[in-house]
Every structure is written in structure tokens, then in C-alpha cells.
């Protein structure tokens, strides 16, 4: 758990993070959003002490981070930045092994971990471990950047616009990879992003910053349904609200009895995808399939009800 308690940062008298209090529960993903210059990066960097606060305290699992030497803290906390930040003259394996090496892991354990992570990120170790970063695509470099941050099995991962430079297809893939890794390792993740869609998709909690202040921290559904201020509402984009709500839930959770004609939708699909499929195929309902079997239906009527403002 990360507890941010009244944290403030001022540069030459200008306050850029203003008494922010926020708790990120263990094993959750907190997406920090806000306009440019609102203090997102500064807030995040105070967690691993790349920036020292002017006031307030940050605790990790109850321990005040200011009582831990910064270099030790950074070995325990993975950090990923936009554009990956790989060392250009070190191979993929050497890059990933950076923290294990600092921690004194032996060669065999390090090599095994490098191969495990490469495999996890769908990069064949034999093919990729000895390459230099410039011989990888942008998406591959990004994956190696995340692998490097995860190498020493940190409990916490800080990510600053990690997917900002990726094209939409690779970006969607990178987001799915991250969710899979989160599920597997239970890492607590703080992720700064400009992209509301990404925040809603990945975040268990969304923290909205403006001018150094935290305006709201809540689940995506709560933020969409009950934005705390007009600014939060604007950031969410009121025109997209119903679709964003539908994007948060799965067809499986809203099955209706009976069946319908035509191509089935998968129970694992989001309600938003089901809605899109119904509109596109001109149907009012579709059968729902789970593990190859029809288990019910989903109707436009049901979707319209679920997309309406929660009471
Ligand atoms: N080292 C520094 N010295 C002085 N001012 C700084 C320093 N670092 C950041 N700032 C200022 O603090 C404010 C917040 O910056 P920060 O990078 O945290 O914002 P951000 O929300 O992450 O922005 P972006 O989305 O554009 O990355 C900005 O006005 C920035 O100019």
C-alpha cells in the first residue's frame, strides 16, 4: 500500500504539488490524469524520491520513504518512463539485468529471470537477448523497458506515460500485457497518463490532478457517474460517458435469459463491444457465447439501461 499524506512540492516558492493525500491499496492500479503541468510526474517521483517533497509524508506498507536511502528505494520500486529510457549501448539482457546486478544476483538467477521476462513479453530470448535497443521496434523497446522495471520483482511499479509514444494497435497490446502482468504478479502500479480512455481501462482508481491539487480519486465508474468538479467532468468528456460506462463491464455480468438470432458475442466482451456489434449488424439482441456454448442473450434495451446515468 502507498499512502501519500499531505504531500507538497514547491520550487522557488511556486507550489506544483499542493497537499495531496491519496492512498493506493496494495495490488491495485492507480491512474493519475490531469492537464499538462498539473503535477502528475512530480507527485509520482516523490514516491521513489527522485523528487524530495517540501512537506508531507509518503509511506509504503507503513514505512516512511524518507527513512529509506533513496538508492535502496529505487531498487525496490520499478520505474518506467515514456520512450523506455533503455541504455543504448547495452544489450536487451544487460538492460533487463540492471537492478538484479546492483542487488548482486548471481549470473544464473539473473539469466533465468531475463529469459522469463522476455518470454512473458513474447520476445523469444534466443533471438532478442543479445540485441541492442536500436535493433528493436518501438513497441519492443517499450516492452523491454517494462521488463527491466520488473526484473527484481518489485512490489511497486511507477509508470510515466509508458505507452504515450506507441501507435494505437501496439498501445492496446501493451495495455493488455500490463494487465496480464499485474494479474500475475499483483504489483501495485501508479501510472501517469494523458489518455482518459487508458486511465479508465487500466485504473482501479483514477486520481485527477489540476494545478497541483488532487480533485478526485475514485473508481472509474464513480468518476464517470459522479465527477467531483466541472473540470473532472470536462476531462471525462461528457459526450462519451455512456460508452465509457459500457466499456467498464463485461457481457457475462449482464446476461439475459433466452437467445437471439445471428452471430454470437463472447461473454468476455465488454458491453461497449456488444453495443457496437448490435448497432453494426442492425440487431436488437445477440446470443452470448461462453466456452463455445450459447448461455443467453444481450439486448439493446438492456444496454441502454446500463448506459444511463447511475442513480
Ligand atoms: N525541477 C523543477 N524546477 C522547477 N519547476 C519544475 C521542476 N519540475 C517540474 N516543475 C514544474 O512543476 C509543474 C508540474 O510539473 P509536472 O512535470 O509534475 O507536471 P505533469 O502534470 O507531469 O505535466 P506533463 O503532463 O506535461 O508531463 C510544472 O509547472 C513544471 O514546470
Image (tube, rainbow, N blue to C red):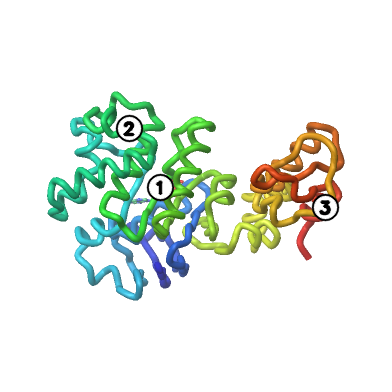
Q: Residue at x 21, y 50 (%)?
A: 99
Q: Check if mark 3's residue and mark 1's residue have beta carbons within 8 Å.
A: no
Q: Residue furthest top?
A: 135
Q: In front here: 19 or 71?
A: 71
* Secondary structure at numbered mark 1: strand
Q: Residue at x 80, y 36 (%)?
A: 279
- The vertical placement of 279 against 158, above or below, is above
Q: Earlier in the sequence, mark 3 or mark 1?
A: 1
- Image-quadrant location for residue 63: bottom left
Look at mark 3 in the image and give the residue it sits on: 302
* Secondary structure at numbered mark 2: loop
- Dot 1 beta carbon under 8 Å from ligand 1: yes
Q: Earlier in the sequence, mark 3 or mark 2?
A: 2
Look at mark 2 in the image and give the residue it sits on: 124
Q: Which mark is residue 160?
A: 1
- The vertical placement of 134 against 248, above or below, is above
Is residue 98 found left or right of 236 in the rendered image? left
Q: In front here: 57 or 308?
A: 308
Mark 3 vs mark 1, foreground winner is 3
Amino acid at each position: 500500500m502507498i499512502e501519500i499524506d499531505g504531500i507538497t512540492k514547491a520550487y522557488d516558492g511556486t507550489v506544483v504539488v499542493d497537499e495531496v493525500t491519496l492512498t493506493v491499496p496494495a495490488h491495485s492500479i492507480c491512474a493519475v490524469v490531469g492537464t499538462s503541468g498539473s503535477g502528475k510526474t512530480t507527485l509520482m517521483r516523490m514516491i521513489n524520491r527522485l523528487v524530495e517533497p517540501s512537506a508531507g509524508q509518503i509511506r509504503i506498507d507503513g514505512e516512511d520513504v524518507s527513512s529509506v536511502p533513496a538508492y535502496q528505494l529505487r531498487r525496490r520500486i520499478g520505474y518506467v518512463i515514456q520512450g523506455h529510457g533503455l541504455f543504448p549501448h547495452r544489450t536487451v539482457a544487460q538492460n533487463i539485468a540492471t537492478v538484479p546486478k546492483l542487488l548482486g544476483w548471481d549470473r544464473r538467477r539473473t539469466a533465468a529471470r531475463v529469459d522469463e521476462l522476455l518470454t512473458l513479453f513474447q520476445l523469444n530470448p534466443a533471438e532478442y537477448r543479445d540485441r541492442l535497443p536500436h535493433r528493436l521496434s518501438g513497441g519492443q523497446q517499450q516492452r523491454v523497458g517494462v521488463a527491466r522495471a520488473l526484473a527484481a520483482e518489485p512490489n511497486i511499479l511507477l509508470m510515466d506515460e509508458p505507452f504515450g509514444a506507441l501507435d494505437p494497435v501496439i498501445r492496446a497490446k501493451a495495455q493488455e500485457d500490463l494487465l496480464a502482468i499485474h494479474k500475475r504478479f499483483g504489483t501495485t502500479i501508479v501510472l501517469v497518463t494523458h489518455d482518459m480512455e487508458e486511465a479508465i481501462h487500466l485504473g482501479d482508481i483514477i486520481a485527477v490532478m489540476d494545478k497541483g491539487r488532487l480533485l478526485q480519486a475514485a473508481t472509474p465508474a464513480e468518476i464517470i457517474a459522479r465527477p467531483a468538479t466541472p473540470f473532472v467532468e470536462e476531462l471525462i468528456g461528457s459526450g462519451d460517458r455512456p460508452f465509457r460506462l459500457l466499456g467498464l463491464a463485461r457481457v457475462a455480468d449482464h446476461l439475459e435469459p433466452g437467445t437471439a438470432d445471428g452471430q454470437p458475442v463472447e461473454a468476455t466482451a465488454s458491453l461497449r463491444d456488444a453495443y457496437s456489434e448490435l448497432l453494426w449488424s442492425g440487431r436488437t439482441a445477440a446470443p452470448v457465447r461462453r466456452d463455445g456454448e450459447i448461455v443467453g442473450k444481450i439486448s439493446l434495451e438492456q444496454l441502454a439501461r446500463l448506459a444511463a446515468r447511475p442513480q
